[in-house]
Amino acid sequence: MSAFRTRFAPSPTYYLHLGHAASALQVWRRASEAGGEVLLRIEDIDTTRCRPEYTTAIYEDLAWLGLSWPEPVRVQSEHFSDFRAVVEALTRRGLTYRCFRTRTELAKMSDPLRPGPHPLDEEEKLLSSGVPFARRLSLSACEDALGDAWNALSFQERTAEGLVTRMADPAREGDIVLARKDSPSAYHVAATHDDALQGITEVIRGEDLIDAPHVQTLLQALMGWSAPVYEHHPLILDETGHKLSKRQQSISLASLRADGMTANQVRSRLGFS
Ligand code: GLU
C-alpha cells in the first residue's frame, strides 16, 4: 500500500469548472511530489441533484486534463448500505436523534444548531403519521460517550508552515445531520467513512471545507476510524471575487473544450504548466 494516498472526490451536481480543475491539478501534483497515488471518488449521495451524465463528464474532463486514477472508482450511491450501517451503529449507542423539523421551524428555535430530540409523545405522533425525519448526531451524548477524549480531539493540518496539530471543535456545526429526510446518508458520514475505508492518508481540498475536519475528527473518534492529514488550498475566484460554483453554472471545462481551449492552456492559466 502506498504511504501517501489522497483522493479527488467531486459531487456530480453539474459540469466541472476551472475551480475543480485547479483543485484536481493540485491533488495530483501533491501526490506526484510525494510519490503517492490519487483515488477518484464520485460523491453522488444527493440523488435529487446528482446526475449520471455529470459523472460521465467528470471522467472525460479529468482524462482530458491528463489525469489518471486506479479503477474501479468508488461511486458512493452504490454503497448506501455502508453509510446506513454507520448511522445505525451510532443510533444503537444512543448518539443520535430523529429531527422532523423543517428549515423554517429550526430558524425560529433559540439554538437551531442543537435542536435536540422531540418530546417522546410528539415523536410518536409524527412517526405514526409518516412525517419524514433526518437523523442528527447528539453532541451532548457524544461528549458523555467520549469522556476525557472529547476535550482531547485533535487533527493534523498541513499548512505553509508545516504540519500543525489543531484542537477540534466538533460543536461548531451543531448536531450534525447524519442522514437526511430523503437520503440515508449526509456528506460527513459518507466522506469520512470512505476516507477511512480507502486508506486515505492526506485529504487535499478547497478552503470552503476548512471546517470539515472538526466534525470528521469526531466521527473518526466515535467509529475508531483512521484519521488523514488535512490540507486546504485557496479557491479560484471569478472576476467579481466570488468563488466559482457549479450551482451558478460557471463556465464548464466541457464548454471551454468545445470552444477550442486545450488542456495545456487550462493548465497554464491555472499555474500548472
Ligand atoms: N464532494 C465534495 C465536493 O464536491 C468534496 C468533499 C471532500 O473533498 O471531502 O465539494
Image (cartoon, rainbow, N blue to C red):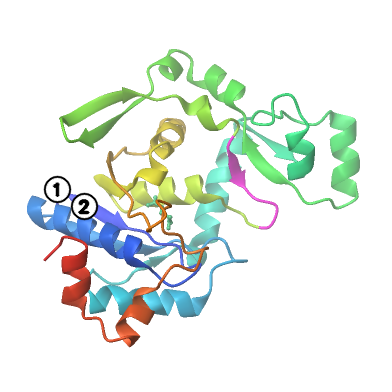
User: On the image, numbered disc 2 is attached to which residue?
Assistant: 5
201 left or right of 212 in image: left
Residue 141: x and y in percent read 60, 23
Q: To which quarter of the image does residue 26 belong?
A: bottom left
Discs 2, 1 touching: Cβ within 8 Å = yes
In percent of the image, x 11 and y 66: which residue is there?
Answer: 273
Based on the picture, tell me whether residue 180 belongs to the magenta stretch: yes
Tell me the magenta residue range.
Answer: 176-182
Up the image or down, 159 lies above or below 150; here it is below
Residue 49: x and y in percent read 58, 66
Q: Is mark 1 within 8 Å of ligand 1?
A: no
Which element carries disc 2, helix, strand or loop? strand
- Residue 265 visible, this angle: yes
Q: In the image, ligand 1 is in what quadrant?
A: bottom left
Residue farthest along the front direction in this orientation: 240
User: On the image, numbered disc 1 is attached to which residue?
Assistant: 3
In percent of the image, x 32 and y 65: which residue is there?
Answer: 18
Q: To which quarter of the image does residue 229 belong?
A: top left
Residue 10: x and y in percent read 40, 62
Up the image or down, 237 lies above or below 97; here it is below
- Residue 100 visible, this angle: no
Which element carries disc 1, helix, strand or loop? loop
In percent of the image, x 38 and y 23: which residue is there?
Answer: 153
Residue farthest along the top direction in this orientation: 148
In percent of the image, x 39 and y 69: which residue is there?
Answer: 16
Q: Nearer the viewer, residue 85 or 164?
A: 164
Q: Tell me the kind of residue under disc 1.
A: Ala
The quadrant of the picture occupied by the N terminus is: bottom left
